[in-house]
Image (cartoon, rainbow, N blue to C red):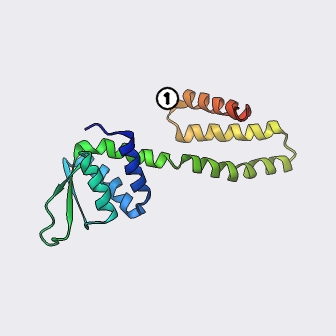
């Protein structure tokens, strides 16, 4: 079934209301689907998980099964391996929604850790730039795959140029 952007946004809205424990179930589910052909999940009718998983069932990512014999008031969902990729993509998309908040937080917290100490040590703007370049280089070497270094540096250059031009009218 083709999934619309509106359906993805609806799922993300539900996911944003979920607890860390509920989200950990989905993270573990995607890992389990790497090993297993199907995975069964049980929940309580009317729970946040039930509401979310029923939406996923509509998309064909899960299907409702019969309740647990020991707990008649349960809902069991069967998840097939084919659901792993769309679930992973959804969880990554949800995490990416936090990037603007993270960007703003880092913009507030990091500059005071760099510029004032460099200036206090008699450093010039070029010295601050050298410190920032060193941080970029260390980040690249530690966290970016070598094959992506050139692309990473180009992206840093492009973003720095964009920021230096100020807001666009």
Q: Quadrant of residue 1?
A: top left
Q: Residues within 10 Å of mark 1 (few under 14, many from 20)?
A: few
Q: Nearer the viewer, residue 10 or 76?
A: 10
Which secondary structure lies at badge 1? helix
Q: Quadrant of residue 123?
A: top right
Q: Is residue 71 left or right of residue 30?
A: left
Q: Nearer the viewer, residue 125 or 147?
A: 125
Residue at the spot 44% in from the left edge and 48% down from the top edge: 94
Q: Nearer the viewer, residue 18 or 132?
A: 18
Position above or below: 160 against 63: above
In this view, which residue lies farthest toward the right?
122
Q: Is residue 59 left or right of residue 105?
A: left
Q: Position of residue 84 (x, y in %)?
A: 29, 45
Numbered circles on residues, count: 1
Position above or below: 40 against 119: below
Q: Position of residue 140 (x, y in %)?
A: 58, 37
Residue at the spot 59% in from the left edge and 31% down from the top edge: 155
Residue linked to disc 1: 147
Residue at the spot 15% in from the left edge and 64% down from the top edge: 67
Q: Quadrant of residue 81?
A: top left
Position above or below: 142 against 78: above
Q: Nearer the viewer, residue 118 or 165?
A: 165
Q: Is residue 126 left or right of residue 1?
A: right
* Quadrant, the C terminus: top right
Residue at the spot 57% in from the left edge and 37% down from the top edge: 141
Q: Position of residue 4 (x, y in %)?
A: 35, 39
Q: Position of residue 95 (x, y in %)?
A: 47, 49
């Amino acid at each position: 079934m083709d999934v619309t952007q509106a359906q993805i946004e609806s799922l993300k809205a539900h996911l944003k209301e979920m607890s860390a424990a509920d989200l950990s179930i989905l993270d573990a589910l995607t890992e389990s689907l790497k090993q297993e052909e199907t995975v069964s999940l049980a929940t309580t009718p009317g729970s946040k998980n039930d509401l979310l998983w029923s939406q996923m069932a509509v998309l064909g990512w899960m299907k409702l099964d019969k309740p647990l014999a020991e707990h008649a008031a349960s809902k069991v969902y069967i998840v097939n391996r084919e659901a792993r990729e769309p679930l992973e993509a959804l969880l990554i998309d949800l995490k990416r929604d936090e990037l603007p908040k993270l960007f703003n937080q880092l913009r507030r917290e990091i500059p005071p850790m760099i510029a004032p100490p460099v200036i206090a040590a008699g450093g010039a703007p070029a010295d601050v730039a050298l410190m920032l370049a060193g941080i970029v280089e260390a980040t690249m070497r530690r966290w970016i795959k070598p094959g992506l270094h050139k692309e990473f540096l180009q992206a840093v250059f492009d973003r720095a140029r964009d920021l230096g031009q100020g807001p666009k009218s």
